[in-house]
Amino acid sequence: MRTIFCLLALASGFIGSAQNVAVLPGTQPLTLQGDLSAQMVAGIDTFLSREIEHSIAGRQKFWNRDFSSAAAYEKSVEVNRERLRKIIGGTDVRLRVADLQLMGSTAHGARIAETELFTVRVVRWPVFEGVSGEGLWLQPKPSARARVIAVPDAGQTPEMLAGLSSGLAPERQFARRLAENGCEVLVPVLIDRQDTWSGNSRLQRFTNQPHREWIYRQAYEMGRHLLGYEAQKVFAAVDWFKTESGASTAGDHGARIGIIGYAEGGLLALYSAALDTRIDAAVVSGYFEPRERIWQEPIYRNVFGLLSEFGDAEMATIIAPRNLIVEHSPAPKIDGPPKPREGRAGAAPGKLQTPEYTSVEGEFQRARTLLKAGNPKTFDRLKLLTGAEGMTTGPASDRALTELLSALGVTIKEVKPPGKAPTDSRISFDPGERQQRQVKELEEYTQKLCRESERKRAEFFWNNVKATSPQEWETACAGFRSNFWEEVIGRFPPPSVPANPRSRAIQISHPTGGVAAVAGYEVVLDVLPDVFAWGYLLVPKDLKPSERRPVVVCQHGLEGVPADTINEDPGSQAFRYYKAFALRLAEQGFVVFAPHNPYRGEDKFRQLQRKANPIKKSLFSIILAQHEQILNWLSELPFVDSKRIGFYGLSYGGKTAMRVPALLERYALSICSADFNEWIRKNVAVDSPLCYMFSGEYEMPEFDLGQTFNYAEMAGLIAPRPFMVERGHGDGVGTDEWVAYEYAKVRRLYDALGIGDRTAIEFFNGPHTINGVGSFEFLHKHLNWQN
C-alpha cells in the first residue's frame, strides 16, 4: 500500500535528475501549518464580511434620484423598485379581485364577531391560480374613514390582532384598535414558524424547517420567494380596496390606504409600501435596522443581491414621498428553527433579536440623508418613534396608530383606548387548519412552477441559441454564459493579487519500496484579499525535456480535502468514494492538480453562502475566482500544455464540474461524476426522498436557476468542448431515469452540432463513487494523451 509522507520530491529542474527538492521550482516555501481547509473558510469569511460593509457605499451607483418633483422622483426610482420586485420574486401576474369571498359554513357564518364599533368576518381573496390570501375583515360602523392592511408577525394570528384570542394585550391588538377608530381593516394570515406541514405525509418524510423556510427553499430556486408571495397577497388586498372604492390605479386616491406590520409583518409592510405606490402610508414596527447582518437572520429572509442595492434606508427612500413611520419596538426573540427531533431535522440556523436603538436611529438617519436633496415639505415624511431615552415602545403604540391615521387624512388628537372586546362565535376554530391550507397552496403553486420550468428554460435558452456548427454555438452562448455568471452565480472581479505561489513536497511511496513514478507538492496561491487557493500538484517523473503534458484538475466532494483524492487505503472512506483517482491519473502520465474547494466545515462553510447571497454572490463566486488563479498558475508551468487542461469532479466536485468549466473556457473538457441530475427537480420537488428539500443542505438553492439553467443548459455552455457524465446505478443522489432524461438533451445538442463523439455517459454497477474506466478513456482521447 502506498502512503503519503512529507518529503523532497521533484527532480531538479523538473526533469531527468535524481536530486529531490523540497520546494517546487518557481515557488516560495510553504510555511502554513494546521488545518488549511479551516483557514481557507475563515479567510473567505473575512473577505465576505468586508465586501458586505463595502456594499453600503457601493449602492449609490444603482440610484439616480430626481428630486425636482414628486412625480419625477417616483419615475426616477421605478427601476430600483422593479429590481426589488424581481429579487423578492414578486413577479407573477395576479388574478383580478372582484370581491372578498366570505368563508362561512354550516357550523358558523362568515360573520364571527360584532361590537358596537365594528364587525369581523372571515374572508379570502384570490392571488394566483390555486393561491389565496386568507384572514379577517374588520368593518367599522357606520363607514370607513380609511382602509388599512394590518399584518401580524409570523408568530401571531389575525385573531390575536382582532382581539378574538389570547396572546396580546388589548392595547397591542392593532387591527381591533384601528377598526374602533373608524378604519376598515384587512388582516392577512402569514406563513408561520412552526414545522407541522414541512414535509410529505405520503413519503413519511418531514423536516424541522419552519413553514417559512419550507416554502422559501423551493421558491428561491424558481426565482420566487416567500416575501414575494406574501407581498402579492398584500397587493391583491390593495386591489380589492381600490375596487371597493372605485379607484384602481396608482395616484388615484379614491380611498387612502395604509399598511401596518409588526416584526415579520413589519418587514412585509416595508417591502409592500416600497413596491406598491397605491399604499399611502406605512408603519413598520419591530423591523428596521442596518441589514448588513441579514446572514444571521432566519434563512427565509435571505434575498439574492439585496445589499448590493438596498438596505432598509434605501427601501425607505422608495416609499418617499409617501409617509413612513418606523417604530422601535421589541422584536420577537427567535433562537433558531424548531428543535431537531426524531424524523425531523435539516433546518437552517437563524436568529432574531431586538436591535439597539443606536443602530435603528443610524439607519433611519441614513434614509433621511439620502433624501436631503429634496424639498423637505415633499420628501421629509419619515418619522421614528421610540420610548424614553431610546427604549422600545409598542408594538403598535398609540403614537404609531395616531401617526398612521393622520397620514391617511384622519384628523384626531389621539386614538381611542380599547373598547369592549369582541367575542369569537366559532366554537372549535383551529387556526392550524387554515395554516395548512396556506402552506400547501404555496407549496403546490411552487411545485407547478417546477413542473413547468423545462418549458421556461427552453424559452430562455434553447429557443434563443441558433447554431449549426460548433463555432456558431460557441459565439451564440457568450451572452448566456455572462448571464449565468452575473445573474445566477454572482461574479467577483478576476483575482486581484499576484498568485505568490508557495509549495512544499509530499512523497508518494512505491508499494514495493521502489521509486514512485509520481512527485507531489502541496501548493498555495493567493487569489483575493484573505482568500487563497490550495491543492496538491502531482507530476509524473518521466517528463522529457521541453515536454508539455495535459493536466487533469481532480475535484473532491462535500467535506473532502485534496488528500482524499490520492488516498489508497482500501478501508478508508476517502478510497470508497475517490479510488485515489488523482494518483491513478498521474501514474498514467497526466499532470494532476487536486484543489481544495471550501465546502467543508458544515455550517461554517454554509454561512459563507449566507454571507455571499445578499451581495449577489455565492460560494461558487469564490470557487470560480480560485479556479481562475489556478488556471493562471498551471498555464505558466513549463511542463503544462495550457490548451489541454481538463476537469473531473465527484459529488460536490461534480457540481463544480457543471459550473466552473461552463464559465471558465480555458478548461478543455469536463467530467461530472456522481452528481449530474435533473438538478431543478432534485432541489425543488417534494415528491421524492432523494430531493434536497428533505436534507440539511440549505445552501443548495440558487436564485432563479430553475427558469434559466438546469444541468443540460450548463452542459450547453460547456459545449462544444468535450463533456462526460459518470453515473453509478446505486448512487442515491438521483435515479438513472432522472440522469438519462437530462443527459438526453446534451446528447441531442452534440449530435446536432456534428460533434457527438465529444460527449459520453457511462453507467456502471456501483454507488456514489469514481469508476475510472470510461472516464479515463475519455480523458486520454480528448486531452490527446497516450502513455
Image (spheres, grey):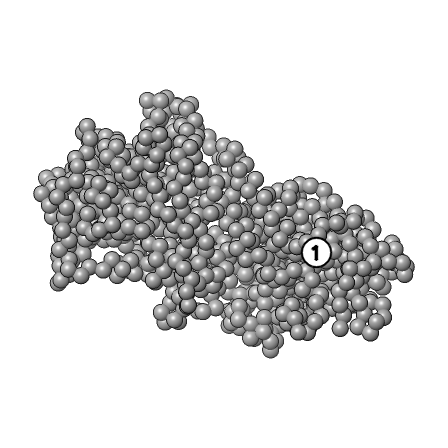
250 or 172: nearer the viewer: 172
Looking at the picture, tell me which residue is in the foreground, 733 or 250: 733
Q: Residue at x 41, y 39 (%)?
A: 355
Q: Is residue 319 above or below residue 746?
A: above
Which of the 4 image quadrants contains residue 175?
A: top left
The answer to whether 6 appears left or right of 658 in the picture is right
Q: Which residue is mark 1?
A: 535
| Residue 291 showing in the rendered view | yes
Quadrant of the drawing holding the C terminus: bottom right
Residue 404 figure quarter: top left
Seen in the image, is 40 located left or right of residue 345? Answer: right
Residue under the image location 53 percent in, 35 percent down: 58
Residue 723 image-quadrant placement: bottom right
Q: Nearer the viewer, residue 451 or 735?
A: 735
Answer left or right for 591 relative to 769. right
Label 1 secondary element: strand
Give amino acid for label 1.
Gly
Q: Position of residue 589 (x, y in %)?
A: 79, 65
Residue 362 horizontal/vertical position (percent): 43, 31
Q: Residue sitting at 29 percent across and 58 percent down?
A: 435
Please state the horizontal and vertical placement of residue 378, each as a whole percent of the image.
33, 24
**Residue extending furthest bottom?**
765
Residue 379, horizontal then vertical, whole percent:
35, 26
Number of numbered callouts drawn: 1
Crowd band around label 1 with a 10 angstrom C-alpha radius: few (<14), some (14–19), many (20+): many
Point 47% across, 65% down: residue: 691
Quarter of the N terminus within the rendering: bottom right
Left/right placement of residue 661 relative to residue 25 reads: left
Residue 404 shows up from this direction = no
